[in-house]
Amino acid sequence: MANKPQKILITCIGSMLFAITGAGGILAQTVTYSGNLQFSTGSYFFTERTESIYFTNSLSYSGDYVRLSLSVPYVIQSTPWISYSPGGGVPTGGPGHGYVGRGDQQKDMIRGGKHHIDIPDTASYRQAGLSDPGLNGSLRLYNSSSQNTTLNLNTSVKIPLSNPNTGFGTGAWDFGGGLSFFHRINTVFLFTDVMYWQMGDMEDLDLKNPFSVSAGTGKAFMDGKWMVTASFLGSTKMIDDFEPPMSLNFGLGHLLSSKVSFSGSFSVGLTESSPDISIGAGWSTQF
């Protein structure tokens, strides 16, 4: 039975779906396909490095006030220790999540004397497969008359379809809800996004329910056809005894036409719960 935070988030999602269904016949509507390819590498708090490739396909519906999207990720990983989530990879330990849950740590003096977890029997591991799809919704709460300032209510659901033993998911539902703010001043813009996540637990690992925050700035140039961004992404703790994930992110976007765009991204992890480096490329087309 869902607890109170889950009930609140499910109610928000249901309200947004109702709004989309009721308003779909009278609002301007667009359908967009988006793709993203990302490579991440890092040792996190394990003794060996994990390399991950995420290939995500998304289909979204947008009206004047609402947006609903479905994302399906395909994952290739060198270890099963990183579980996919809507906010990125989570170092749960995958089939060895009991080691993380118990805090089975060892001293690794080569890496600064910090404690790290050694999970055995994965030296020859490399697998690929579909991960948990995600359903995301957004409802516009405020839009200024100049359209330079917007405030949105956002929700997200991760549907547990993958096997947690592969490292492609946790085997549990995740729910997210929060607000995003955007403000533009000529060619410079500011943005922030705050989300609360209700994380599903694994059999031998209880995940904390974190708040995540993303804040950044960007600038458009060449008549808005090019855009650069810089942002910080962080959250409260998800796993006891380990630092929460935090990263610095940089992006470059190009608007090829009014319906087609491309983007690139580069991220640097700041804590042991984040990958050391992530590089990505994205594209989208509007129908």
Image (spheres, helix red, strand yellow):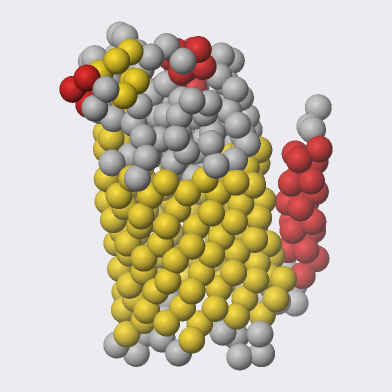
Q: Which of 50 and 236 is in front in this view?
A: 236
Q: Which residue is drawn at 24% across and 27% down?
A: 112
Q: Where is residue 3 in the image (x, y as percent from the top left)?
A: 79, 33
Residue 99 appears in the figure? yes
For the view shown, which residue lies furthest in the top direction? Answer: 121
**194 left or right of 270?**
right
Q: In this view, does 50 lie above or below 18?
A: above
Quadrant of the rendered structure where residue 231 is? Answer: bottom left
Q: Is residue 113 above or below residue 176?
A: above
Q: Residue at x 49, y 22 (%)?
A: 164
**70 left or right of 232?**
right
Q: Residue at x 36, y 81 (%)?
A: 220
Q: Nearer the viewer, residue 103 or 68?
A: 103
The N terminus: image quadrant: top right
Residue 129 appears in the figure? no
**122 left or right of 25?**
left
Q: Residue at x 31, y 79 (%)?
A: 226
The mark total stands at: 0
Quadrant of the rendered structure where residue 160 is? Answer: top right
Q: In this view, does 158 lie above or below 212?
A: above
For the view shown, which residue lies furthest in the left direction? Answer: 110
Quadrant of the rendered structure where residue 271 is? Answer: top left
Q: Position of residue 283 (x, y in %)?
A: 36, 62
Q: Position of residue 119 (x, y in %)?
A: 34, 13
Q: Is residue 146 above or below residue 8?
A: below
Q: Nearer the viewer, residue 271 or 118?
A: 271
